[in-house]
Image (cartoon, rainbow, N blue to C red):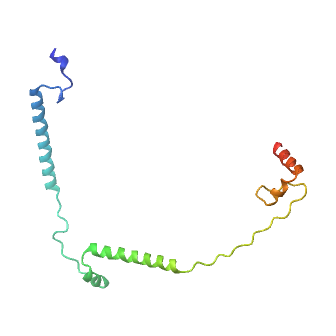
């Protein structure tokens, strides 16, 4: 009967209290071993970069700029701010400069259609074309073709 109640091993929901205790001990010892291995590996591979290097000797324009902005973050912020300022000035200048006046181009007037042709639906002549019963019949016949 007891084998029937058991589910797969290490199941905390259906195991006996003794099994659950052993599972908890095994789990905590596994986690502790992992933690110790991680700490040991990180201590062996830890690199202390930049802690003992001498400060660089700047010359020329770098020496002047680094006199005002000694940290790399400060210099990067100034450079990005300069580019942003140029962008804003260009946008303001283009907003105030007058755009060339666009002249209205004369619309080409379509030549009157011949007596037997059907004018284009978008043309102004189409409305006058539909006033005649004979022209409406021509249009219907052209649809049937």
Q: Is 48 placed left or right of 67 in the picture?
A: left
Q: Position of residue 14 (x, y in %)?
A: 17, 25
In this view, the residue in front, 70 or 78, is 78
Quadrant assignment, res 15:
top left
Quadrant assignment for the C terminus: top right
Q: In front: 145, or 40?
A: 145
Question: Residue 9, position in %: x, y?
Answer: 18, 27
- Identify the residue at the far top of this view: 1
**Where 75 sits versus 122, above or below?**
below
How many numbered discs?
A: 0
> In the rendering, at what x and y percent does residue 11 appear?
18, 29
Q: Quadrant of the N terminus?
A: top left
Quadrant in the rendering for residue 120: bottom right
| Residue found 24% across the figure and 75% down from its top | 71
Position in image of residue 101 (x %, y %): 63, 78
Q: Is residue 124 above or below residue 66?
A: above
> Does residue 145 appear to the left or right of 85 in the view shown?
right
Which residue is at 81% across, 45% downward? 143
- Residue appearing at x 11%, y 39% in the figure: 28
């Amino acid at each position: 009967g007891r084998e029937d109640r058991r589910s797969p091993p290490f199941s905390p929901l259906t195991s006996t209290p003794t099994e659950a205790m052993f599972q908890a001990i095994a789990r905590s010892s596994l986690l502790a071993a992992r933690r110790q291995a991680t700490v040991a590996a990180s201590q062996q591979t830890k690199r202390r970069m930049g802690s003992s290097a001498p400060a660089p000797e700047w010359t020329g324009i770098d020496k002047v700029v680094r006199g005002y902005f000694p940290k790399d973050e400060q210099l990067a912020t100034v450079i990005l701010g300069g580019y942003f300022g140029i962008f804003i000035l260009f946008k303001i200048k283009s907003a105030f400069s007058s755009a060339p006046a666009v002249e209205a181009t004369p619309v080409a007037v379509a030549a009157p259609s011949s007596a037997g042709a059907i004018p284009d639906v978008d043309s102004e002549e189409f409305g006058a074309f539909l006033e005649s019963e004979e022209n409406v019949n021509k249009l219907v016949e052209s649809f049937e073709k």
